[in-house]
Image (cartoon, rainbow, N blue to C red):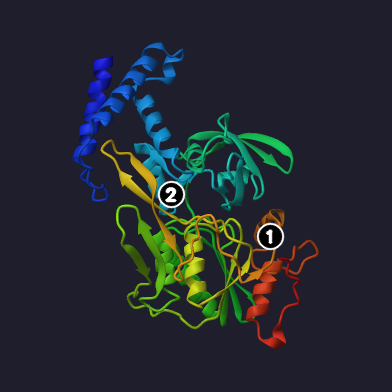
Amino acid sequence: MRTKILLLLSGIAAALLAGCTTADTPPPQEGAGEKDYLNAGVLVQAMDILNRKYVDAEKTGNDNLFEAALHGMVSNLDPYSDYEPPRAFDRNQKRRTGELSGIGVTIVKPHRNPLHVVNVIPGSPAEKAGIKPGDTILAVDGKDLRKLNFYQCQQLLTGRPGSKVTVTWNAAGKIRKQTIARKHLVTPTVSAAKLAIPGIGYIRIDSFTSHTPDEFLRARKKLAGEGAKALVIDLRNNTGGLVRSAVLTLSQLLAPGTILFTATQRDTAKVETIRSMKLKNLPPDTTTPLVLLVNSFTASSGEIFTAALVDNKRAQTVGMRTFGKGTLLSVVRLANGGALRFASGRYRTPSGKVIEGRGIRPDHAVVTTLQTLHKLTLQMRRYPGEVRPNAKDAVTDTQLEKALSLLAPPAEKPHDVTEKH
């Protein structure tokens, strides 16, 4: 058995050292030292012992132990890095482009806490099961999610269309449990494009995928045709996504060559400057007044988008301090078809500010509770044609009202909103 494991690891190591044929695989580091070979031998020894003596044989096996070793090695670095086995990599690639097979929830994962549902795709299996924004997912197929990281939880919820997953969640203090069939979903990232008041449009961007730039362009054209002269862009609960998608969307609002952010990586002292792009047959809109809505779950690419517009004096912000994720993630294919997802650099705003661990302070602080934000999300579903419904049970969106007050002509200002700092 020891020989088989050694041959297995040797083969994998050789493949890794030789490099993959994919273009995104970095060149191998030269000169593995004597201690490195000793460590590899210790790993072989540990796998051999567990394979022969661990009490539950079904939990061992070369593949299981090797994947567990990779998971542990990478996920120990930070909350965002991990190893993606081949099947997980394929699923995650679809998710990164905006297409996946799952139950249809947008989630965040506070450290060592249950999953928090911030949005539910209309018509999705999750919505039909009764899961709502504000609920917390406690377990998936009986696995307690508190000790897992965000990506591990996400992998449990996604899977083959038609496959089933048992979800346990807390709905306003009531514990519910139901088996839900996964479904292929193409998630719209621009979930709302409406007039808030005459002359002012409202666009909500839930995340950044490969579909976002086109969706955003369609939303802008729609609202311009309806008479919008200014825009409120809602980035609340936008947990990020593809950086390139954020760059292409920003390029619709900033002159070509405008600095969007800078990035530094460990293996070079060079500072990389990312600038807005010249889009074919699409001149940028550099004059429409903009106000961005942000909160504590606006993160990653959502923060890049926000900081680029704020630092370039293109927009004002209203809401709460953002999440503070300033690491750039790289996904590198491995010889076995899986991939490493890891933090390869850190970014700064155009003015040189650090976002990691600090977030972005809004220009106009308007504090609201998470419960209120969830009520507003549900309210948009209940009154799909209205951003500010005139109904007895309607919740006032104080952050949106503040944004509208900054954009509306003096004679058409919405009612005053008290700011809380």
Q: Nearer the viewer, residue 395 or 38?
A: 38
- The x, y position of residue 71, in whole percent, is 41, 34
Q: Is residue 211 visible?
A: no
In the drawing, what numbered circle is on residue 376? Answer: 1
Q: Quadrant of residue 141?
A: top right
Earlier residue among tags 1 and 2? 2
Callout 1 secondary element: helix
Q: Is residue 166 visible?
A: yes
Q: Nearer the viewer, residue 402 or 71?
A: 71
- The x, y position of residue 91, in whole percent, is 40, 43
Residue situated furthest bottom in the rendering: 411
- The x, y position of residue 92, in whole percent, is 41, 45
Residue where numbered disc 2 is placed = 95
Identity of the amino acid at label 1?
Leu
**Looking at the image, which residue is at 66% across and 45% down?**
135
Q: Nearer the viewer, residue 123 or 53?
A: 53
Q: Nearer the viewer, residue 131 or 58?
A: 58
**Looking at the image, which residue is at 21% across and 38% down?**
17
**Looking at the image, which residue is at 56% across and 52% down?**
121
User: Do the CB atoms of the residues marked 1 and 2 lie less than 8 Å apart?
Assistant: no
Identity of the amino acid at label 2?
Arg
Which of the image's four quarters has the N terminus?
A: top left
